Image: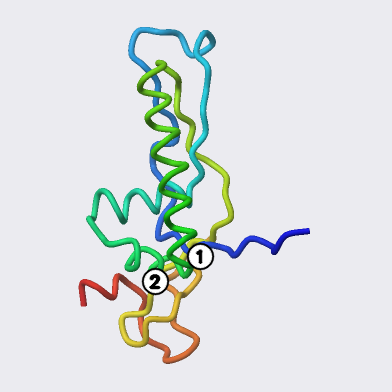
């Protein structure tokens, strides 16, 4: 029996969770899935141009885990583009949260209607890199 998966930190759930080729009805397309945590790794590494070490620190996983997540996500996207498949984004082992501006600890934001406060220093969460 292997080790249990470590939960990954994700800042926000994606607003769009489905992509498909234009002009082909969804019911006639094969679907492939990218998990929310894999998308977050791609967002940080490919869109925000962070190194894998920075992505690993941000998501609180090891660098080899980030490498595996990126490889799976990129392979899935490439397969969908090459073979005309639909891409569904969902699932995965993740927690929604933001990093505290003051101390860098993660603050869980899932289901919260009010701005959360950091447990460690009572600071406000937000993107520490922008502070």
Identify the secondary structure beneath mark 2.
Answer: helix
Question: Seen in the image, is 7 located left or right of residue 15?
Answer: right
Along the viewing direction, whichever of 7 and 124 lies nearer the viewer: 7
- Tell me which residue sits at (48%, 14%) in the image: 26
Along the viewing direction, whichever of 57 and 64 lies nearer the viewer: 64
- Tell me which residue sits at (50%, 86%) in the image: 119
Answer few, some or many: residues within 10 Å of disc 1's Cα (few below 14, many 20 plus, some between 14 and 19): few
Q: Position of residue 101 (x, y in %)?
A: 31, 80
- Tell me which residue sits at (69%, 62%) in the image: 4
Identify the secondary structure beneath mark 1.
Answer: loop
Closer to viewer: mark 1 or mark 2: 2
Can you identify the residue that label 1 sits on? Answer: 112
Question: Seen in the image, is 41 located left or right of residue 37?
Answer: left
Q: Disc 1 versus disc 2: distance between alpha carbons?
A: 24 Å
Answer few, some or many: residues within 10 Å of disc 2's Cα (few below 14, many 20 plus, some between 14 and 19): some
Colour setup of the view: rainbow
Can you identify the residue that label 2 sits on? Answer: 57
**Where, quadrant-wise, is the N terminus in this rendering?**
bottom right
Q: Position of residue 127 (x, y in %)?
A: 29, 70
Along the viewing direction, whichever of 122 and 86 lies nearer the viewer: 86
């Amino acid at each position: 029996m292997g080790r249990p998966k470590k939960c990954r930190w994700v800042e926000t759930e994606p607003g769009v969770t489905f992509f498909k080729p234009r002009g082909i009805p969804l019911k006639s397309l094969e679907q492939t899935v990218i998990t929310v945590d894999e998308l977050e790794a791609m967002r940080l590494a490919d869109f925000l141009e962070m190194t894998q070490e920075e992505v690993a620190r941000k998501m609180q996983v090891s660098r080899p885990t980030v490498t595996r997540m990126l490889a799976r996500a990129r392979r899935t996207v490439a397969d969908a583009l090459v073979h005309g498949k639909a891409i569904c984004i969902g699932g995965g082992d993740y927690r929604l949260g933001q990093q505290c501006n003051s101390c860098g600890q993660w603050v869980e934001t899932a289901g919260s209607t009010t701005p959360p406060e950091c447990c460690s220093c009572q600071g406000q969460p937000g993107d520490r890199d922008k502070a």
